[in-house]
Structures are given as C-alpha cells and as structure tokens.
Image (tube, rainbow, N blue to C red):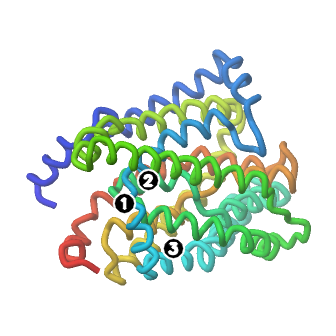
Amino acid sequence: MDNKEVMQEDRGLGFFEKYLTLWVAACIIAGVAMGQLIPAIPKTLSKFEYANVSIPVAVLIWLMIYPMMLKIDFSSIVRATKKPKGLAVTCVTNWLIKPFTMYLIASFFLKVVFAEWISQDLATEYLAGAVLLGAAPCTAMVFVWSHLTKGDPAYTLVQVAVNDLIILFAFTPIVAFLLGVSNVTVPYDTLILSTILFVVIPLAGGYLTRTNIIRRRGIEYFEHVFLKKFDDVTIVGLLLTLVIIFSFQGEIILSNPLHILLIAIPLIIQTFLIFFIAYGWARIWKLPHDIAAPAGLIGASNFFELAVAVAISLFGLDSGAALATVVGVLVEVPVMLTLVKIANGTRYWFKQIDEGGV
C-alpha cells in the first residue's frame, strides 16, 4: 500500500475510527474510574443479567452488529457456503489447534515460568480458565472485528453459524479431556440466549430493514445514503461496551494487578499465534482478504460469556478459573484491535488475490 492509498484510506475513516486506540484507552480508564468512584452504576447494571449474559452489554453488542447485518445480501449467504476453504481454515484452527495450543502455552507460563509467583494449585485453576477460553471461539464480537477489516459480512455470518453448531457437541469433550474433569456441562441457556441476541435478532433486524428500505427507496439510496448513517454506530457501541465491562471489573484489576498481568501474558501470546496460523494459512490458500481476515480473527477472539459461565459453574465465582476468564475479557478488545490493525496493514499481501478472485 503506497502513501497515496494510505492517505485516501485515512480520510475515509470515521471520527471515532481514526483515533480508535486513544478512544479505547480513554474508555478503559473511564470504566475503571466509574466502577471506583460511582459504584452504584455498575452495581445497578449488573442486576440486568440473564443466563450469565449482561443485557446492557448485549444491547450494545447488538448495536455493533446490526450495521454489519444491514450489508448482507441474503443471496450472498448461499454463495458463501460454496466456498469451503475459508470454513476449513476457521474450523480446523478453532477446534483442532486452538484449545491444545492454549493448554500448552498457558501450562508452560503459569506452571513453569511463573512458578515463583503463582502456587501450583492456583496455577491449575488459572489454567482451567485459560482452557475454557481456548475452547470457546467468538460468536458475537467477530462481527465487529470483521467490520473493521472490511470483511465479507455474509461469509462471516456463515463462519459464526458453523462455530455455534460445533460448540454444541465439541466444547464439552474438549474441555473434559484437557482438564481431566468429567462433570463439564454446557450452560445451554447462555449459548442459546447469546445466539439469539447476537446472531438471530440483529440478522432478522438487518434483513427486514434492508428489504423494506430497498423496496421503498431503491438500492442506490440504501447503499449510498442510508448505510452512511450507521458509519460510527459500531465504534460507539464498542466504546460504550468497554466502559461498562471495565466498570464491572475495576475492583479486580486494582486488587490483583500482578496475577492479572501474569495470566494475560499467555492469553495474549495464544491470541497472536492463533491469528497468524489462520491468517497465514488463508494467505497460502489464496483466499481473498475479506475472508482471510475474519477467519483469523474469529479464532483469535473468544466467546467469553460461555467461558465465564462454565468457570463459575465448575469452580465457583471466587475461583482462579473464573478470574482467568475475566482476564480474557479484559485483554480481548485491546489485543483484537491490534490484530485488526495488522490485518488492515497487510491487506496488500492479498492484492493480487483480491484483484484476480479466488
């Protein structure tokens, strides 16, 4: 990408998107400060929860996803299912690689490298939380990461749908095998509610809005006028979500700074590793960038609602496993935004593929 292209792309960014890193940092600080200075706000918001899913956060995630669903032409979903390579990259990376590399990396750091600072019993609990994150690929926020990399929305939807189906039967045996526990149960209410909130509702809303606007005003108006109204909605939803999440976790951050840092290190290494495995594989297979980027990002991020719910049900609310899954929530957005930047910055790797087709 030459300087002229960079300048053109930079001018095309929205107000929030152009300085997204600074906005994210400000929202993290604001969230922690809110939790400490005005604890009544997160305390009140935490009451609106069902099946371990925060309803206020769910609404904001819905706002993030809805603009992307507007862009989906439903005929393109059928075409997406006829491109199996991208789905193969996603499925193999998420289910045959990611849980096991998470176990190995987290075990090495938590039980060997950090043995001086973490007891073996606590390290085992932290490892359990890491494994739960590794066995739960993202099914919601990936729509946001895909949007930020100009990913194919229809193909991203298909990738998410396939992962939702695989979670139903693969999550339990993988976690049971890696943790050596036999009483792992998937909280299906969390899984089903998340699927409805983060896939079904925004997809239905996007479809109804799209068909109605196009029927009344035409495709030109829809693409060049109506969609422009949602340019910053996804980013604003992301920033507000950060404020809420960090207001919930401010006390944990301030009371366990060292252990949070130690847990975060293997989680971050794992995230980068999985992204580059999937992204690099997609490049070798000559997949276009709008499929390769979401394929890398969906495995790198986690279905943290599911991981947190299982950690609490298996090990308890105050367990090390639950803390480790929360750390996964805390590091996810900053790390994923870094990967989004990498994906956008390496778009030129796919220039010849994108111009010539798959």
Residue type, mark 3 in image: Thr
Bin the neighbour count of mark 1 within 10 Å (Cα to Cα): few under 14, some 14-19, many 20 and up: many
Which residue bears the numbered disc 3? 90
Residue type, mark 2 in image: Trp
State how far apart marks 3 and 2 are (Cα): 15 Å
Residue type, mark 1 in image: Gly
State how far apart marks 2 and 1 are (Cα): 8 Å
Nearer-N-terminus badge (3/2): 3
**Residue, x 65% and y 65% (percent of image)?**
134
Say above or below: 274 vs 30. below
Q: Is residue 43 visible?
A: yes
Nearer-N-terminus badge (2/1): 2
Which residue bears the numbered disc 2? 145
Relative to 132, 246 lies left or right: left
Nearer-N-terminus badge (3/1): 3
Q: Secondary structure at mark 2?
A: helix
Bin the neighbour count of mark 3 within 10 Å (Cα to Cα): few under 14, some 14-19, many 20 and up: many
Give how far across and how far down residue 126 sits, in percent. Answer: 75, 56
Q: Quadrant of the N terminus?
A: bottom left
Say above or below: 109 vs 78. above
Which numbered dot is residue 52? none
Q: Secondary structure at mark 3?
A: helix
210, 116: nearer the viewer: 210
Q: Which of the 4 image quadrants contains residue 310?
A: bottom right
Residue reaching furthest to the front:
216
User: Do callouts 2 and 1 mark residues in contact (Cβ within 8 Å)?
Assistant: yes
Which residue bears the numbered disc 1? 151
302, 216: nearer the viewer: 216
Bin the neighbour count of mark 2 within 10 Å (Cα to Cα): few under 14, some 14-19, many 20 and up: many
257, 99: nearer the viewer: 99
